[in-house]
Amino acid sequence: MKWTLISLTALALSNTVTAEDQAGPASIEEAADRALEADTLAWDFVEGITTEVGPRQAGTEAEKRARLWTRAWLAEHGFFNVADEPFEMETWVPGDIAKARVTAPFAQDLAVLPLGNSAATPIGGIEAELVEFESFDELLAVPDGSLTGKIVYLSHDMRVSMDGSHYGQFGLARFAGPTVAANKDAAAIVIKSVGTDYHRNPHTGTTRWGDSATPIPAGAISLPDAANLERMFDRKGDRPITLRLEMNPRNLGTTLSGNVVGEIVGRNPDLPPVLLACHIDSWWNAPGAFDDGAGCGIIAAAASHVAASGQPLRTIRVLFAGAEEVGLIGSTAYSEAHIDEPIGVGIESDFGADRIWRFESNFRETNPDLHQRIANSVARFGVANSTIEASGGADLNIVRDQGGAIIDLQQDGTRYFDLHHTPDDTLDKVDPAQLQQNVAVWTQVVGILANEERSIQTGGMIPTAPATMEN
Amino acid sequence: MKWTLISLTALALSNTVTAEDQAGPASIEEAADRALEADTLAWDFVEGITTEVGPRQAGTEAEKRARLWTRAWLAEHGFFNVADEPFEMETWVPGDIAKARVTAPFAQDLAVLPLGNSAATPIGGIEAELVEFESFDELLAVPDGSLTGKIVYLSHDMRVSMDGSHYGQFGLARFAGPTVAANKDAAAIVIKSVGTDYHRNPHTGTTRWGDSATPIPAGAISLPDAANLERMFDRKGDRPITLRLEMNPRNLGTTLSGNVVGEIVGRNPDLPPVLLACHIDSWWNAPGAFDDGAGCGIIAAAASHVAASGQPLRTIRVLFAGAEEVGLIGSTAYSEAHIDEPIGVGIESDFGADRIWRFESNFRETNPDLHQRIANSVARFGVANSTIEASGGADLNIVRDQGGAIIDLQQDGTRYFDLHHTPDDTLDKVDPAQLQQNVAVWTQVVGILANEERSIQTGGMIPTAPATMEN
């Protein structure tokens, strides 16, 4: 996919016709309709951060550069109260060696990357027999201690799913597979990447060691390599397959990360704000265009377009969370720091840049009028209503902790796990037209919410404090 | 693309119905029609060599394993006179370090691989200002000596082309760009990969140093990285872009490579044989499914199906050339060794595994009846006739040297340069249905040629010797 050249021309053309600086939109509806055809802000953000910063792993110098870059962008684009709210974290880095080679009976390299929190191998690597498990359940079923000295290969059956639901189930291979292998005394583990593409780019991501597990080297191989390895198991006969694995990740100890915040200040700052969230960090191996540069561009653009149509009633706060990939650390820190400040409603964008197709809230029953009004307002953008209860994304911890109102604007995830946590998560994957549809839907929804006088969650009067009383 | 699971099931089902071992096909036409639905041989070859051997760079131990594997496969599948014909070559290997990082004004790693014959950087790399050239002609135009101490970045405008014609023109960036940069005293060069995909997998391939050039470090960056770098040039203002580049390729000196040959022996071995060619080597970074495992599978399967329909009049010789990627060394060695043995006609398969869409020969005017008969015979497989004069592929040097008859069965190259010389050239990219269409067309064409009594090139009587007299 090569959207860039076409898109920039198209954007430039439409910009000359309907540029917002000629005259502000007369209404939220007009602002949303304009965004669908002519938004350039989201693209500007995601192009800028991927080009001028690039990969920005949590807790590193690169993530700090991303915070500085984001603060400057927000200040340039009319946001107030822009700040970096720092927090401490334990930082793991991948090192610069990641090699896997089948040494017998068929000699061949495999493309591998370490999982977040992986242990290192000894220098020079380890070489051991590889034992194949077709599923997480199959690995769970073997006796403790039965894998002593072996390297585990763990496969799974993830497929493409528009709503991303396969990630939760088959992602166990990554989330928990390494802990199970370690508890069964394996020397190391390589998993089939938790993803859906057939390129030689492994999908990394965090693995969390259970309390009982001593970390072992844990890597992901690409799906073409996994398919090849599985064919080797089919063809090996009685011969064992041996693997040599070398990786040198390490822990840096405590470093600083931070959340960047900014505001479009409302006419009544006493009303609980609308919180728009995304995350600023990426994995080290990609510039994070889909995950989550685009999401940050979408929320910033929507807030800006709402402001351009007239100062909103409520404040719109944007939260560019740090250290999401490594365990929602920024989201947790934000909630701890701000738990006493009521949030009116929270929405997150963190599922790529493809079109929004479904609207969900957690107030369909408690505030049916508002739910239906929002559903009606986005139907013209091809977004359907839903009875599914919104649960919010990773960076909305504060809203969940407050028991507050949440909206999910579900994006088409068909391509998402082709790119997620791989080196291929680059700007060329972003389709400008679908990015604009996201901004249009967000502008419409945020515009309604930011001008809502009554409690978003219940439709009743808004109590003054504390936050949880808004329920 | 994930064809494998579907395909194996389909192959297994059709196999039980129409397996050739139940009864041989009654005619070439029937053999070709059966291959379209039920060929498993080509898949077996390409699956086997990619799984059991994998990458097999010219002149290395891996290429030797590929020759042994191929000889065993041919002997198991009914070929006679199977042999390995060795030759010496100068062997370059890529080393294990390939790093590029923009260090200012935007710090970011780029995915890079060395080009074949690249020089190494000093240990620790070199860091220098990067100078952008948008085309080969633009690089050619700057004065000699004007690039002293600089690193060249060379872009190009290659697009997808069904017939692969863009490779010849825009491939100059790789074929000759490094020599031009070296002659202008550049410290190193990185080119935008000569390819059409947007994955973080650079396209390698040979660069040939002109007589006047002293080799410099020469690498290719992936297309997403090239696009990102070009955006950096757009955004840098007056600031220079600096690049740190480290690569450690080296020359091994003289090693052995070889050509594997085999035959379906004809009823009249005195008639010049039909030569079917492919190449056995790949680059180090991929198992070479498209380039050229599939091609070798196609020619072997076609020869086998022709034999199964009855012993052909002429001998069919298969040539699995060594060391094609690094300069057609095996093809040249084969021609030197066998130049006095007349070849009746040569055909090569070396453009992936997608469907054949066009038939060309170089005897349309000298033997119009045979040309038209072949064109008519393959129309039912969706292959059109053409007035383009066939020139043959890389491994047909002997036929060109003899001035002999050549056929080109043009494959759909739309996807070819997404995969060519990248780590992504893996088995999952092969579509079994299109692979079978290739085998069907080849079976039909080779069946006609191998049973042709008269000179293929002129339609006249076949002289006894020398080869060039057949014209």
Image (cartoon, coloured by chain):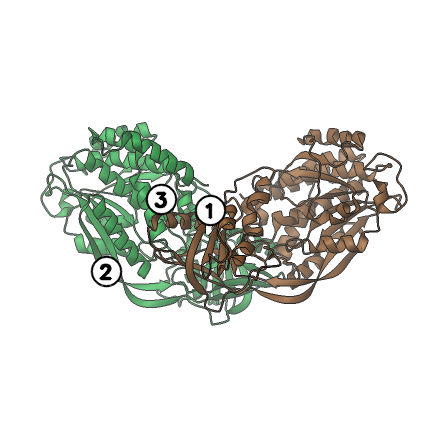
Chain colours: A brown, B green
Q: CA distance from mark 3 to mark 2?
A: 25 Å
Q: Chain of mark 1?
A: A
Question: What's the residue type where badge 2 is placed?
Answer: Phe
| Pointers 1 and 3 in contact (C-beta within 8 Å) | no
Of the residues tagged 1 and 3, which is closer to the observer?
A: 1
Report the front residue among B259 and A52. B259
- x and y, in percent, of residue A202 in the image: 51, 52
Left or right of A278? Residue B286 is left
Q: CA distance from mark 1 to mark 2?
A: 44 Å
Task: Tell me, for residue A134, which label it has, or none.
Answer: 1
* Residue in the picture at 23% in, 60% down: B87
Does residue B378 appear anywhere in the picture? no
Report the front residue among B189 and A304. A304
| Pointers 3 and 2 in contact (C-beta within 8 Å) | no
Local packing at callout 1 (Cα closer than 10 Å; few below 14, some 14-19, many 20+) is some
Task: Tell me, for residue B351, which label it has, or none.
Answer: 3
Question: What's the residue type where badge 1 is placed?
Answer: Glu
Residue B160 drawn above or below residue A151 = above
* Residue in the picture at 11% in, 37% down: B461
Q: Chain of mark 2?
A: B
Describe the element under mark 1 as helix, strand or loop.
Answer: loop
- x and y, in percent, of residue B250 in the image: 38, 67
Task: Tell me, for residue B87, which label it has, or none.
Answer: 2
Which quarter of the rendering shows the C terminus of chain B?
Answer: top left
Q: Residue furthest front?
A: A143
| Mark earlier in primary sequence (3, 2) | 2
Residue B445 quadrant: top left
Question: What's the residue type where badge 3 is placed?
Answer: Phe
Of the residues tagged 1 and 2, which is closer to the observer?
A: 1
